[in-house]
Image (cartoon, rainbow, N blue to C red):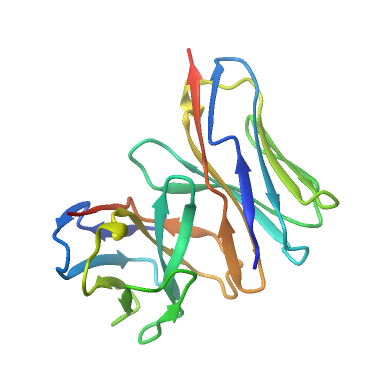
Amino acid sequence: GEQVEQRPPHLSVREGDSAVITCTYTDPNSYYFFWYKQEPGASLQLLMKVFSSTEINEGQGFTVLLNKKDKRLSLNLTAAHPGDSAAYFCGTGGNNKLTFGQGTVLSVIP
Amino acid sequence: EAAVTQSPRNKVAVTGGKVTLSCNQTNNHNNMYWYRQDTGHGLRLIHYSYGAGSTEKGDIPDGYKASRPSQENFSLILELATPSQTSVYFCASGDAGQFNERLFFGHGTKLSVL
């Protein structure tokens, strides 16, 4: 079945710097991809859901890139701020199944 | 905003004891899920349901049962709890079919089995 590897498990950046979290997946039939954000002590909230037809997806202060050839999904936070400190989970969907990555704990230092 | 409520928020159980984790959603979503979250593993699906009366096995169902008595409620049952089931458990609901959906998560239940 699908396997999703997420790296790094922990990431610490200074305020204003960029942060990149990357996931690789194995199932070529996966057709949609997502990122969830979990702030400390809170539940997971959907950050962005993207479909395989779109390789670049821009949100507020971040970009999600999908490279289908390399089966790689990345979350790029531009100019990180302390409010971005959270755990981030990538994942894939397809074949009636969602598969999550292991998670990345991001710390943004003021 | 979708509301998913889990209870209890924290639970300490003894090995061999029975544990029931409860989940309630007020959004009339058909699909509900139970995940456990462990360091290094992300979220892993235990059981899920397509509606009242339905329960399906997820990726790691061994040692767990589920019950969906109504549209709103979905319970996870550990009949004989073991220390390996110490984890954080998340319930989620979703309103689209075929897993192609946005999930709304509860705040989690931290379970410690001693």
Identify which residue is drawn at 45% across, 76% down: B30
Asked if residue A56 shows in the view, the reply is yes
**A79 relative to B81 in the view: left or right:** right
Residue A69 versus residue B103 in the image, above or below? above
Q: Locate the N terminus of chain A and report the quarter of the image it occupies.
A: bottom right
Q: Which residue sits at x=29%, y=66%?
A: B24
Asked which quadrant contains residue B96, the reply is bottom right
- Left or right side of A93 for B67: left
Is residue B50 toward the left or the right of residue B88 in the image?
right
Seen as rendered, the residue at the extreme bottom is: B53
Compared with A14, B5 (above or below) is below
State the image coordinates of residue B14 (x, y, percent, origin top left).
Answer: 13, 60
Residue drawn at point x = 40 percent, y = 82 percent: B55
The answer to which of B63 and B76 lies nearer the viewer is B63
Q: Residue furthest right?
A: A69
> Is residue B29 at least partly visible in the picture?
no
> Which residue is at a point 36% across and 42% down the rendered structure image?
A42
Residue B99: where, in percent of width, then height? 57, 70
Give the number of marks. Answer: 0
Residue closest to the eye, B4 or B83:
B83
Position of residue A56 relative to residue A92, above or below, is above
Left or right? Give the position of B48 relative to B108: right
Give the image location of residue B106, x and y in percent: 35, 55
Picture coordinates of residue B64 (x, y %)? 32, 73
